């Protein structure tokens, strides 16, 4: 099973990368494509979702996987949406690869204790 799914206008140069919360799957973003028809929406499952196994489930490992998906799909920049831990992941992605990020939208970004 694919780790990502492309919805909406597949040939559009306007792209949204969407990451779900823990316990959710990439398919949760399908309905968003009904309203944002001019965008290509690439929804990506988190590590361990959709019966996929991954040895390293760290945020930094997933950040690199997102970059690999963008390279594979030849996406040079995109808007990023992340729900809960997906919001943490897209912030970490932006920290490492800011040139890919046009905007960040954090949905219920979660609580992060710096101590």
Image (cartoon, rainbow, N blue to C red):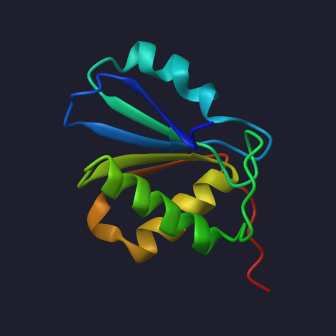
Viewer-closest of 49 and 34:
49
- Which residue sits at x=74%, y=36%? 24
Residue 84 x/y as whole percent: 69, 50
Tell whether 81 sits left or right of 38.
right
Tell whether 83 sits left or right of 64.
right
Q: Residue furthest bottom?
A: 115
- Which residue sits at x=30%, y=61%? 100
- The picture quadrant where one finds residue 36 is top left
Tell whether 33 sits left or right of 21.
left
Viewer-closest of 23 and 61:
61
- Which residue sits at x=30%, y=28%? 39
Label count reads: 0
- The picture quadrant where one finds residue 19 is top right
Viewer-closest of 39 and 52:
52
Classify 95 as above or below 45.
Answer: below
- Which residue sits at x=80%, y=41%? 23
Question: Could you tell me if residue 12 is visible in this image?
Answer: yes
């Amino acid at each position: 099973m694919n780790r990502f799914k492309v919805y909406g206008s597949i040939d559009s140069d306007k792209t949204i990368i969407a990451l779900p919360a823990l316990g959710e799957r990439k398919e949760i973003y399908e309905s968003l494509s009904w309203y944002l028809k001019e965008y290509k929406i690439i929804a990506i499952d988190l590590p361990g979702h959709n019966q996929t196994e991954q040895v390293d489930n760290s945020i930094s490992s997933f950040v690199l996987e997102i970059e690999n998906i963008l390279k594979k799909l030849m996406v040079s920049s995109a808007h990023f949406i992340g729900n809960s831990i997906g919001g943490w992941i897209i912030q970490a992605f932006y920290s490492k690869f800011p040139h890919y990020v046009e905007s960040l939208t954090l949905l219920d970004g979660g609580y992060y204790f710096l101590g």
